[in-house]
Image (cartoon, rainbow, N blue to C red):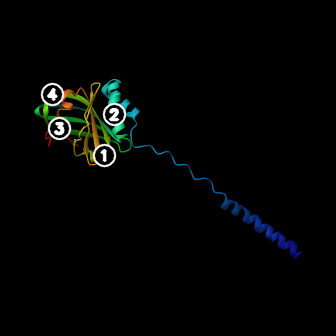
């Protein structure tokens, strides 16, 4: 009788213990995290945005963007806008547009800057600027000076590069002509329009 009672108590204990043991042994796999979306833009996205902005798909635009991507990689922002300028030895350039980022929102920006060189005349153009290594949208509000050896002219589109610390801004303009390689200067980005280029 005692043996039967002990066996019954042990069986009940085991029955109560086994589900806990089994639960402790089985661990469901952790949930798979949602794929992280990159904060940069692919060449296809930039060419598409540029084509819509400039009004046509151009092999010149695609080649200029390809050159920028091969040199600096994928931008984490870009600006679409328009600018106007004029020069006679010394020149001025003014523009406005919108900075687009993947995960920090869009931001209205204005830019202006002086130049000195062998160019003259006036010009207005649509401008796309690729922005690299931008840590925060407000970091665009500063001066960017030219980077040596960064002027290109392909199929009616011109590209230069401007830098400040690690941030690089690459303006791509349509129909810039002689002004692309014949002047030096900088661009200053501001949150509001101003006539002061300095």
Q: Which residue is mark 4?
A: 122
Q: Position of residue 147 (x, y in %)?
A: 24, 41
Q: Earlier in the sequence, mark 4 or mark 1?
A: 4
Q: Secondary structure at mark 3?
A: strand
Q: Secondary structure at mark 1?
A: helix
Disc 4 + disc 1, Cβ < 8 Å: no
Spatial CA distance of label 3 from label 1 is 26 Å
Q: Quadrant of residue 9?
A: bottom right
Spatial CA distance of label 4 from label 1 is 31 Å
Q: Earlier in the sequence, mark 1 or mark 2?
A: 2
Nearest the viewer among 52 and 144 is 144
Q: Earlier in the sequence, mark 3 or mark 4?
A: 4
Q: Which residue is painted at 37% across and 31% down in the image? A: 47
Q: Say few, some or many: other residues with alpha carbon within 10 Å of mark 3 (under 14 / 14 to 19 / 20 or more).
A: some
Q: Quadrant of residue 126?
A: top left
Q: Is residue 2 above or below residue 178?
A: below
Disc 3 + disc 4, Cβ < 8 Å: no
Q: Earlier in the sequence, mark 3 or mark 1?
A: 1
Q: Secondary structure at mark 4?
A: strand
Q: Which residue is mark 3?
A: 184
Spatial CA distance of label 3 from label 4 is 16 Å
Q: Which residue is mark 1?
A: 137
Q: Is residue 9 above or below residue 79?
A: below
Q: Depth-wise, is mark 3 or mark 4 nearer the camera? A: 3
């Amino acid at each position: 009788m005692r043996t039967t009672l002990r066996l019954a108590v042990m069986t009940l204990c085991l029955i109560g213990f086994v589900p806990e043991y089994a639960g402790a042994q089985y661990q469901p796999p952790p949930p798979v995290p949602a794929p992280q979306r990159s904060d940069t833009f692919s060449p296809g996205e930039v060419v598409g945005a540029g084509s819509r902005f400039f009004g046509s798909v151009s092999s010149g635009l695609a080649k200029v963007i390809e050159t920028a991507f091969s040199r600096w990689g994928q931008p984490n922002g870009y600006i679409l806008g328009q600018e106007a300028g004029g020069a006679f030895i010394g020149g001025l350039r003014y523009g406005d547009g919108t900075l687009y980022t993947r995960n920090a929102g869009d931001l209205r920006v204005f830019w202006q800057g002086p130049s000195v060189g062998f160019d003259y005349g006036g010009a207005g153009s649509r401008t796309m600027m690729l922005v690299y290594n931008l840590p925060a949208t407000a970091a665009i509000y500063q001066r960017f000076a030219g980077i040596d050896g960064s002027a290109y002219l392909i199929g009616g589109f011109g590209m230069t590069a401007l830098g400040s610390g690690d941030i690089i801004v690459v303006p791509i303009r349509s129909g810039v002509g002689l002004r692309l390689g014949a002047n030096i200067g900088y661009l200053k980005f501001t949150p509001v329009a101003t006539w002061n280029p300095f």
